């Protein structure tokens, strides 16, 4: 595969926040020969797909946006999904990315040979590129448990990420399966219109007050006229969130019991007066081990007269009901699967094949890992946005995406300038990096004994970054070119 055979220098797979961060960084680095491949007919990724009732971000709006494209017009402290999706469309237009996107190009395979990648779509289209950059996102593939009999249930079944807005829930009998992040947003909305709602809770979750509010017109005008005030406002929120990591999640979190435990327990006790119900809603694991949920209205919704909380397991479904493992039959017109996502399948159905026919799935068998969250040993010219161990439990992922995008674009520019276009991480560098990561993760609350989607099947935390975002930014700016081999692999 010679240079003249390449359709583009870079293919970015995914047109959400990750893909846009990568594209803008490449453009700024003078690497403008790229294409963004989007499986759907619209941009947005997570925020395009997750438009269920009450869908909202858990990170303050002014922090959940690109640092170079602040939005003075956020309507709420925590923005709803539709508002975030509108911001993404603004970024697409503001940075001229619309013409760089190939819509409905669902990449199903990518294979490396002779210095580049051959990408195939589900419709048989082919694309040859030198560099493959995945920007697919982590919470993307709906997790749909195979409950016995669900296929014979005659009512409506919807996963939170596949919401049917043409369906009218008014006056329906509903079952919501799940009680985590999406469930606590959906339940208050649907409980208000349901005849009867049953919430099937497998595991209790800790909640803390969201304290959402509308942003006033005065604040918006001030942010528009005096952008430095908005930057100061964002910087304040950034520092608070990094402080929260030290106080609540790290191994040195001496303030955890006095600060976070106090806030969480006061919030839950204040909102739930029934001791028996509070006991059902209170987890046994340490606060922070699983994702801490933010909500002002979930606990009041659970206590509505038309809502029941059930902690029994699910035995089976019938044509019009759910049967618990204790034999209770619960009639329903609508079943909502608020069951999260398949986090271990990072690339879904996209098959990535490296040199000598070794697939990424094979290389990751038993251990999902990367070097500095963006590169994988044995896979030349392959990079990831939102790769292993770059997720967060305390702040905005967009901070991480910007750092990754700058890092990758710097590597690609160095390869171009050196005349050695093939980039491959050195195995010893990846091993040393992951050894240090896992050592640090052992000292966090996420490793305190609970099971969570942060972990793989072996119980190894492959999703989260074990330090502050400030440290990630510093490390990604300090690019050590010696951790990579640069050479020419075109034959």
Image (cartoon, rainbow, N blue to C red):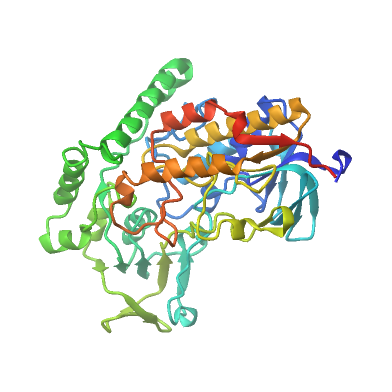
Image-based side of 148 in relation to 380, left or right:
left
Q: Is residue 217 above or below residue 4?
A: above
Q: Is residue 487 left or right of residue 179?
A: right
Closer to the camera in the image, 213 or 278: 278
Q: Residue at x 60, y 38 (%)?
A: 89
Give how far across and how far down residue 80 sits, in percent.
43, 43
Question: Can residue 192 be seen at all in this image of the molecule?
Answer: yes
Compare residues 198 and 31 and report the one nearer the observer. 31
Q: Nearer the viewer, residue 321 or 232?
A: 232
**Placement of 247 over or under 347, stated as above or below:** above
At horizontal 34% and vertical 33% (from top left) the residue drawn is: 241
Residue 490 x/y as whole percent: 82, 42
Tell me: residue 359, above or below residue 287: below
Q: Is residue 84 left or right of residue 353?
A: left
| Quadrant of image for the C terminus | top right
Q: Give the quadrant of residue 251.
A: top left
Residue 151 at x, y percent in the picture: 49, 79
User: Quick check: can you spot residue 92?
Assistant: no
| Residue under the point 74% across and 31% down | 32
x, y percentage for residue 332?
Answer: 37, 75
Please give the name of the residue rendered at 60% of the width and 60% of the height, measured from the top-left corner. Answer: 362
Which residue is most to the front?
A: 428
Count of residue discs: 0
């Amino acid at each position: 595969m010679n240079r003249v055979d390449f359709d583009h220098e870079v293919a970015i797979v995914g047109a959400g926040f990750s893909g846009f961060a990568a594209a803008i960084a490449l453009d700024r680095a003078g690497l403008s020969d790229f294409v963004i491949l989007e499986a759907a007919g619209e941009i947005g990724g997570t925020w395009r797909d997750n438009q269920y009732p009450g869908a909202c971000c858990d990170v303050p709006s002014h922090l959940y946006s690109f640092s170079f494209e602040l939005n003075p017009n956020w309507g709420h402290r925590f923005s709803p999904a539709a508002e975030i999706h509108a911001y993404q469309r603004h970024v697409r237009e503001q940075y001229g990315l619309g013409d760089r996107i190939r819509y409905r190009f669902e990449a199903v395979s990518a294979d490396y040979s002779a210095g580049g990648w051959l990408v195939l779509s589900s419709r048989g289209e082919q694309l040859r590129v030198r560099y493959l950059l995945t920007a697919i996102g982590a919470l993307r593939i709906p997790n749909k448990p195979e409950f016995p009999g669900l296929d014979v249930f005659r009512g409506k079944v919807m996963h939170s990420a596949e919401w049917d807005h043409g369906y009218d829930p008014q006056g329906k009998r509903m079952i919501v399966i799940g009680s985590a992040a999406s469930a606590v947003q959906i339940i208050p909305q649907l409980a208000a219109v349901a005849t009867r709602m049953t919430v099937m809770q497998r595991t209790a979750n800790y909640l803390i007050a969201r304290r959402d509010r509308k942003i006033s017109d005065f604040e918006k005008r001030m942010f528009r006229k005096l952008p430095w005030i908005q930057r100061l406002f964002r910087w304040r929120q950034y520092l608070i969130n990094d402080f929260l990591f030290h106080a609540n999640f790290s191994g040195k979190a001496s303030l955890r019991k006095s600060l976070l435990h106090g806030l969480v327990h006061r919030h839950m006790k204040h909102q739930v007066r029934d001791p028996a119900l509070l006991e059902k809603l209170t987890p046994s694991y340490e606060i922070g081990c699983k994702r801490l949920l933010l909500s002002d209205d979930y606990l009041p919704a659970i206590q509505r007269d038309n809502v029941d909380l059930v902690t029994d397991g699910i035995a089976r479904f019938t044509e019009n009901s759910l049967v618990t493992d204790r034999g209770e039959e619960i009639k329903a017109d609508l079943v909502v699967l608020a069951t999260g996502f398949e986090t271990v399948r990072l690339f879904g159905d996209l098959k990535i094949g490296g040199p000598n026919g070794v697939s990424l799935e094979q290389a990751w068998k038993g251990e999902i890992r990367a070097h500095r969250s963006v590169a994988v040993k044995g896979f030349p010219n392959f990079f990831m946005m939102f790769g292993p161990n770059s997720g967060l439990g305390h702040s905005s992922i967009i901070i991480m995406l910007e750092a990754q995008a700058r890092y990758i674009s710097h590597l690609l520019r160095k390869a171009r300038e050196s005349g050695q276009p093939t980039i491959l991480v050195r195995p010893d560098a990846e091993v040393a990096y992951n050894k240090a990561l896992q050592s640090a993760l052992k000292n966090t609350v996420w490793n305190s004994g609970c099971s969570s989607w942060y972990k793989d099947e072996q119980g190894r935390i492959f999703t989260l970054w074990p330090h502050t975002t400030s440290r990630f930014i510093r490390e990604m700016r300090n690019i050590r070119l010696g951790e990579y081999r640069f050479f020419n692999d075109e034959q």
